[in-house]
Amino acid sequence: MIAFMIRRLFQALIVIFIISVIGFAIKQSVGDPVRELTGISVSEEERVEFREKLGLNDPWYVQYGRFFGDAIQGDLGTSFFYKRPATEVILEKAPATLELVFVSSLIILLFSVPLGVFSAIKPDSLFSRALMGSSIVGVSIPVFLTAIMMVYLFSIKLSWLPSYGRGELVMLGGWGTGLLTLDGWLHILMPSVALSSIMLPLFIRLIRSEMMEVLESEYIKYAWAKGLTHRRVWFVHAFKNTLLPVITVGGVQLGVTIAFTILTETVFQWQGLGFMFMEAVERSDAPLLVAYLMFVGIVMVGVNTIVDLIYGLVNPTIRIAGVK
Amino acid sequence: MNRLDKFRQSFLWYSFKRDKVAIACLLVLLILVLTAIFAPLIAPYNPYDPEMIDIMNSEIPPAWEAEGGTEFLLGTDSQGRDMLSTMIYGMRISIIIGLGAVALQAVLGVLIGLFAGYHGGRLDAFFMRAADVQLSFSYLMVAIFMSAILQAVVGVAKFGEIAIPFLVLVIGLSQWPQYARTVRASVLAERKKEYVEAARVAGFTSSRIILDQIFPNTLSPILVLSTIQVANAVMSEAALSFLGLGMPIDRPSLGSLINSGFELIFSGAWWITALPGLLLVILVLSINMLGDFLRDVFNPKLYKG
């Protein structure tokens, strides 16, 4: 187990290192920090001097060393647009995205488990078939289209729900949360439903197929033979063992979810990381782009490593092989 | 004729004949693809020809709405282009990018999967780790990053000119791991079989064994994966274009059309977003349904690695 953990952590470190190299390469090739940080009135000599002061004339490995050293201390450079440390901007925008992901995960969890389990227990019922049919329609509708259609229907035609922004926020320390006010919930409803719309069918199908496979296994037959109640076999014996693969896939799907937050936040002008990222792209704000890349990279590597370690802990076979 | 007869007796054809949904999907898909191929003949206007566009015609609703006219069957967009023609040309671009991206990722992924799977060792470990990492970021994320960065480096104006090959490259590079994994899994299963052993004893070179002997046996999972991947590639292209990282608005794909219409739905012009959206969903859905059908027929355990 310890060997497995060390190998896994070592791999995570390599990935973070590669991400930092990519981030550094982007920083070097996008925009000119001297031009971005100084005004028009600055003379040519002052520019040259400033360039020297920023260390832009050093060889690239010296610059990379400085970049990496600063990054470890949480300094990812200064945003060209906000004129503030990029880390600060990221931390300010992160709660919005995290709340969005949190609420849509709740929606996914709340619906996918009962629906997936039901369609596995009664695969031939009309409801299960309709569910499977609609789930393939669900994965075929792009998330931004769902979002736009919801805006058209609920905001423009019916004027029930607000179409953009986060609504009234309550500050908890540095965390601006919208989950404590009714207005905040009204604002988060559509974005989170839109975000969950693409993942929900995937999870329903996954839970269904895992559960059906488990129901075929020998120990379930044994449980039936013992004369246990349906409830006990389904929910205690079978369901528990479908959870494991679902957790792993859930970890992998986090990357997909973050990609979709960019789309959802663009439609709803949700002031989170995805919206900030698209703004940074439009403004060629290289430090902020790099900071976002590093932030998302570290979160993703972190979550995947933890998921793998948990998986290794509960499923011993994976430790020995080391390969999925 | 021999091959055709063989196909007629296959399980694939047998199941296909009995599956009405699959037949309907294939028909819809064929109609869409043929429309895309013969777009210049079918589309009533040429959306790329400035002579045919009149800004005075902008935002006319479809013919069945009160203000619509028969001149523009599905209305016009904000620049006065005929929606029907623009959508047909847009779908053409979406399909070209989708197929191109899948061709690229298939070549990359299949070669990596075949050779890494057969030889094993360091090369295999390296590529599979790379695939793991890339998959954990999700292909969409990788594609968004790549196009965002390249657009920042190249500049938006220049980017518009090279958008099609560029999107093919980005989507192709972001999705190769799926192929590599699938192919590798079947290679690992095939490698132990006796015919491979026999070929080795007969003194065939390893590349000949891989390409002539093993490769044909990995084709059915590749076929299933390819259908799903075309749908994924079309969706990715739409997402990138929607974010403004894909096709420019003067040569719109379905995604950039949806994007251009998005701002206008607040003023009530729903058709500029909804119609290309509907076409995109029909296109992706019919491909996905066919993919599902193929998976049921061949039944490879695609998602289990």
Image (spheres, grey):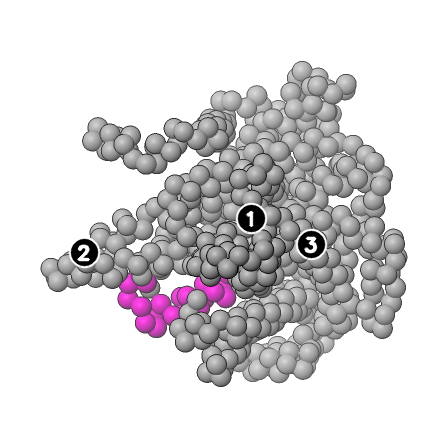
- The foreground one among A75 and A234 is A234
Q: Which residue is mark 2?
A: B195
Residue that protrudes farthest toward the top in the picture: B70
Q: Residue at x 76, y 72 (%)?
A: A88
Question: In the image, is B69 to the left or to the right of B5?
Answer: right
Most common SS among magenta residues: helix
Q: Residue at x 46, y 74 (%)?
A: A316
Question: In the image, is A124 to the left or to the right of A80?
Answer: left
Classify mark 2: helix, strand or loop: helix
B245 w.r.t. B27: above or below: below
Chain of residue at mark 3:
A
**What x and y, as percent, mark residue A133?**
56, 38
Q: Same chain for the residues at labels 2 and 1, yes or no?
A: no
- The foreground one among A113 and A238 is A238
Q: State the CA–CA distance, disc 3 to disc 1.
A: 18 Å
Q: Earlier in the sequence, mark 3 or mark 1?
A: 3
In the image, the segment drawn in magenta is: B117-135
Chain of residue at mark 1:
A
**What x and y, as percent, mark residue A298?**
61, 71
**What x and y, as percent, mark residue B185?**
36, 59
Residue that protrudes farthest toward the left in the picture: B202
Q: Report crowding for label 3: few under 14, some 14 to 19, many 20 or more residues within 10 A (C-alpha).
A: few
Q: Which residue is mark 1?
A: A121
Q: Are marks 2 and 1 in contact (CB under 8 Å)?
A: no
Q: Magenta includes A269?
A: no
Q: Quadrant of residue A161?
A: top right
Q: Magenta includes B130?
A: yes
Q: Same chain for the residues at labels 2 and 3, yes or no?
A: no
Q: Which residue is mark 3?
A: A110
